[in-house]
Image (spheres, grey):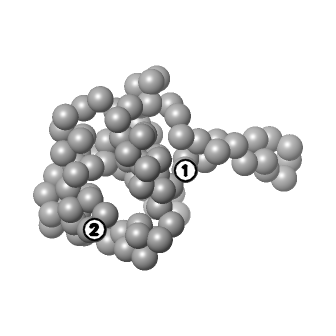
């Protein structure tokens, strides 16, 4: 759907990929699940398989300082194994190569 803020779409993921979320309390006493940065990055690569070459990966324009200094690479790799997809694994390897991780 589209509104004044942009265009949005919903995607379905396999139930076994519903992990990697932190629970954040909201002002109205609700709790919302937010993906960890590691899971959000992997979800991006999973849901948008066209990021399959160096140029496409570079065009993501990811914050390289964050990737190198703050992203938990061990957690990212632990999460990546749960996707169990060779094509996805190749995109993760490409991410590492493109951004020198």
Residue that appears at 44% across and 30% down: 17
Judged left or right of residue 22, residue 12 is: left
Residue 78 in percent (x, y) is at 42, 40
Q: Which mark is residue 27?
A: none
> Gap in Å between the C-alphas at discs 1 and 2?
19 Å
Looking at the image, which is closer to me, 77 or 84? 77
Question: Is residue 31 placed above or below 15 in the rendered structure?
Answer: below
Question: Which secondary structure lies at badge 2?
Answer: helix
Residue 69 in percent (x, y) is at 47, 71
Residue 78 at least partly seen: yes
Of the image marks 1 and 2, the number of the one nearer the N terminus: 1
Q: Which residue is mark 1?
A: 36
Judged left or right of residue 39, residue 83 is: left
Residue 97 in percent (x, y) is at 21, 62
Question: Is residue 96 placed above or below 65 in the rendered structure?
Answer: above
Tell me the quarter of the image containing the C terminus.
Answer: bottom left
Judged left or right of residue 31, residue 80 is: left
Looking at the image, which is closer to me, 71 or 54? 71
Q: Residue furthest bottom?
A: 65
Based on the displayed image, in which of its 4 quarters is residue 21 positioned?
Answer: top right
Tag 1 near tag 2, CB within 8 Å: no
Residue that appears at 85% across and 47% down: 28
Residue that appears at 41% across and 70% down: 68
């Amino acid at each position: 759907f589209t509104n004044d803020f942009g265009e949005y779409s919903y995607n379905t993921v396999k139930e076994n990929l519903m992990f990697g979320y932190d629970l954040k309390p909201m002002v109205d006493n609700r709790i919302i699940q937010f993906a960890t940065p590691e899971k959000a990055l992997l979800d991006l690569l999973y849901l948008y398989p066209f990021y399959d070459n160096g140029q496409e990966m570079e065009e993501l324009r990811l914050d390289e300082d964050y990737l190198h200094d703050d992203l938990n690479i061990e957690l990212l790799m632990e999460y990546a194994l749960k996707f169990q997809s060779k094509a996805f694994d190749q995109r993760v390897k490409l991410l590492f190569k493109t951004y020198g991780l």
